[in-house]
Image: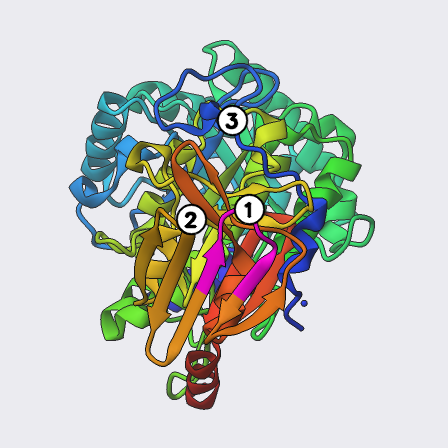
Amino acid sequence: MHKEMKRSVRVKKVIGVLLAMLLAINLGLSPSFAAGSEGNADSAGVSETGKQFKVIGYYSGSLFNEPVEKLQTDKLTHVIYAFLIPQEDGGLVPLEKPDQLRELIAQAHRDGAKVLIALGGWSYQGKPLVTVFESVAASDEKRALLVRNICALVEDYGLDGVELDWEHPSQSSIGNYEKLVIDLRAALDKSGRELSAALNGAWSTTAGPEVSKLMTDECLKRFDYINVMAYDMNNAEHSPLWFAETSINYWLARGVSAEKIILGMPLYARPSWNQYRHLVAENPEYAYLDYVASKPLESYYNGLNTLREKTFIAMKKAGGVMLFDVNEDTDDETSVVSMIHDLLSRTDGSSQKELKRYVSVILNGRELAFLREEGYGVPFIDENNRTMIPFRKPVEAIGAEVSYDKDSRTVSAVKGDVTVRLTIGESVISVNGREEAMDTKAVILDDRTYIPLRAVFSAFGYDFTWHGNSNTVYIQEQLQRAEKSDKI
C-alpha cells in the first residue's frame, strides 16, 4: 500500500456517546503514571516480554530532499530507509544517496535508534517491482545472489537489518516469497540483524485482503516484527480509527504476538496526496482535523488527535507504531513524532492494567493533559462510577473564573452569564441558582478539589463523545462544534 504514496511524491505530491459510558472504566491511576518513574516488564514503553515499544519512521531518502538533521532520531527507536531496489539477476540498483544513508545511520546510532533498509517498494522508474521479485525469488541461484548482495550492503553501511517490502506476492508466488524470507532470515541471523516486513491491514479480525490471507505461518514466525500498512483503504476511508484496530486484531488472530505487530499510520491525505506538514503549514488548525475541503481534491487524513488515539490503541494491543513517511511530519508543537514521544513519556512505567485506565481528554480539539508533576491531580472514577477531574485546570481552560469558599466548602465557576456552584460532599449542582441532583458529589483528595466532569461541563454548554477503544473523551463546546461543521 506504499504505492500510491510514492506515486504522489513523485508528482509533488460512533453518534457521540454520553460520558456515562465511562462507567465501565476503572480509572484509579497509581503514582506510576508520573513521568520518569521506573519501568517494569509490564510497562507501556516495554511489553510483557520486556521488548521496547517501537516508534518507527519510514525515511524515503530517494523521494524527499529533507536534511537528515531534521529527523528526530532521539524520539524514534527505528528508522527504515527506503528504498533498496532489487534487479532480476539478483543484483541491486545502486543507492541514489549513499552519503545520506551513512549520515542517517551515524545520527540514529548516536541517539540509540536502529536503521533498517527497505527492500523493494511498489515500483521503480514507473514500473511495478512485483515482477522483479517474482523472477529473482523463483530461481535458487538468483535468490541466493540477491541475499548475498543484501547482506554485503548491510555490512558495508552498518545497518541493523532489512525490511522486506514485496508488494505483493500472489497465490502463484507466495511459495517463492517464503523461500526468500527463509534464506534472508538465515543470512541475517549470522550477524544478528533484524528482519521485518511491510504487510497489509485488514477490515475485520477474520476478513482481510487476499495478500494478507496468503501470508504463511512460516514467514510470520521468521519476522522480528511486521509493519502493518493500515492505510490506503480508499479515499474517504483512507485510514480511519477503526481500521487501525481491526488491522491489529487480524494479525493477532493469525497468531502473531502483540509485540511483533507495529501499527502503520500515514502522514498524507487522500485523494489529494497532500502531506501532513503542508496542510498544517496552510492552516495550523488542520493539525487537529481529519478532513479538509482542499482543492482541487479533498484531503482525508489523520490529524494529531486520531494519531494519538491510534498510538494508544497500539500501546494497549500491539508493539509499536510506524509512520509513513516521517519526512512529512512538522518540526513544531504539531509534530506527530513529538506527540507520540510525549504520550509514551507520560505513561512510562505504567502497567498494562494501569494503561487500560488511562484517559485522554480532548477539549475543543486540543489535548488537556493532566500531569502529576504539575500538581493539579489526575482524573479518577468515584464510588458511583462517575468520572471526576481536577477542578481548576479544565474549568480555567474554558475561560471560567474559579473560586473556593472555605467556610461553606463551596467551589464556584463563572463564565459569562453562567455560574456553577458545588458544595464538597453534597450531591447537588447549582446552575444560576437552580439546583439539580447529581448521582455523585464533588470531593477533596490530596488537597485538590475534584468535580463530576459531565455535570459541570454540560452546565457550560459542552457536549461529550467517548471513544472506548482509545480511552479518549472529547469535550466540545456546542457552538464551536456547530461552527466547525458549517465550515466543513
Q: State the residue at coordinates (55%, 36%).
A: 315
- Which residue is denoted by mark 1 in the rendering? 425
Q: Say which element carries label 2.
A: loop
Name the residue type under label 1: Gly
Q: State the residue at coordinates (45%, 76%).
A: 432
> Could you tell which of marks 2 and 1 lies nearer the N-terminus?
2
Q: Using the image, tell me which numbered label, if any, was put on residue 30.
A: 3
Q: Is residue 450 visible?
A: yes
Do tag 2 and tag 1 residues touch (Cβ < 8 Å)?
Answer: yes
424 in the magenta segment? yes
Tell me where residue 377 appears, x and y as whole percent.
40, 38
Segment colored magenta: 421-429
Tell me where residue 24 appears, x and y as whole percent.
72, 46
Quadrant in the picture for the N terminus: bottom right
Depth check, mark 3 against mark 2: the one in front is 2
Q: Nearer the viewer, residue 128 or 220?
A: 220
Q: Is residue 226 visible?
A: no
Name the residue type under label 3: Ser
